[in-house]
Image: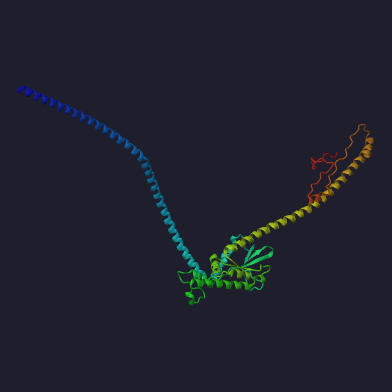
Amino acid sequence: MGQTQARLDLSEKLVSAQTQVTELRERLSQEHSFQSLLADSQSQAAQLESAKHQRLMQTILPINEGLKLLQTSVSSLERQQAAQIGALDEQLKWTRESEDLLRQSTQELTRTLSHAPLRGTWGEAQLRSLVESAGLIEHVHFETQVETAGRSKRPDMIVLLPQDKCIPIDAKVPLDAYLRAQSEDTPLHLDGEDPSDQALTYEQLMLQHAKSLRRHVSELSRKEYWKELPHAADYVIAFVPSESILSAALHTDPSLMHDALNMNVVLASPTSLWAILRTVSFTWRQENLSSQANEIIQLSQELYERLQTLGKHATKVSSALNNASQSWNSFLASFESRALVSARKLSGLSAETQPIDTVKVEARSLDDDLFERNQLGKSPEKPTGLDPTENLDTPTESIS
């Protein structure tokens, strides 16, 4: 019994051991499968990671190229901007220098114009420059400093017009108040200036400038150049050598222009006067063309009269040639019928001589109505009895 029990226990232990071994084998098999699955998963994950990396690189590569191009463009723009900034700095520097020079020149000009004699010379120089730029020539289209009939008044310039007409121009203009108003930085002392006027404001100076210009217009109107200059226009042009000078006065006194026209004075800035002078230049060109046309007409009439005289002489020559031809034919007829017959009898010649041909060509006479038909616009008729293709310079038959 005891051995049997021991065998049973041993068998149970053996079965239990086999069961454990089987379980261990199954576990080992499962672990192997898990490791294989893990390896496959890792391989798939690696492939997936590689594919993702490739797709990411494909996506990033164009962006990288674009960034490189953008960086290149930005670098180029930075270089261009630096060059432009350098050029702009140079321009600003040149502008500042130009402004300084202009300011200095303006101040020097202002100081120069503060003297009345120099101011008048400057106005006359501006007027001459403007007139010459319009194409007018001195002593042909304009004269300077012309004395009037009474020798007491002398305009700065007269512009000559066709048919001995002219327009007087005055280049003097009051600038004291205007120059003082423009010299803000440094006080300007003008000729004959009252020191008490130093405290005047800009508006007060502009008002004084307008009053001075109005007073100048009244003085020009009282001179009445048109009464002492022969064939002069019934007005005088008051030349203001700067647009700003005239516009400042008109801005302060808007009725100044209208009142000046009523006093036969035309206020003209450089622009408006240049337009007037260009019109004068055009008028002179048209006058020259008209004169040339009249001269051509006179020469044509003279040529026509001379051709008429030549035609009369040609008619006389034609008549003389016809008379000479008839006389020659009469001479030949008399020679053959009288002198030649007697000569044959004297010489006893039996042979017949050839008769001398008479002249059959008559000189062509001119048509008396030829010039009258040409004058009326009719074409001359061809002479009858002659070949129109015949060369009249060469006779068709020679005189034997």
Residue 242 % position (x, y)? 55, 65
In percent of the image, x 45 and y 59: which residue is there? 95
How does the figure colour the protein chain or chains? rainbow
Residue 128 % position (x, y)? 58, 64
Residue 358 % position (x, y)? 88, 39
Q: Residue furthest front?
A: 1
Pick whichever, 353 or 390, lies toward us: 390
Residue 197 % position (x, y)? 49, 76
| Image position of 309 (left or right of 89) | right
Report whether residue 249 is seen.
yes
Report whether residue 122 is seen.
no
Q: Which image quadrant is residue 394 in?
A: top right
| Image position of 143 (left or right of 112) | right
Pick whichever, 48 or 33, lies toward us: 33
Q: Which image quadrant is residue 341 in?
A: top right
Q: Image height check: is 16 above or below 226?
A: above
Q: Image height check: is 165 above or below 314?
A: below
| Image position of 323 (left or right of 39) | right
Pick whichever, 202 or 102, lies toward us: 202
Q: Image height check: is 59 above or below 164?
A: above
Looking at the rendered image, the quarter that the N terminus falls into is: top left
In percent of the image, x 87 and y 43: which residue is there? 325
In percent of the image, x 58 and y 72: which residue is there? 214
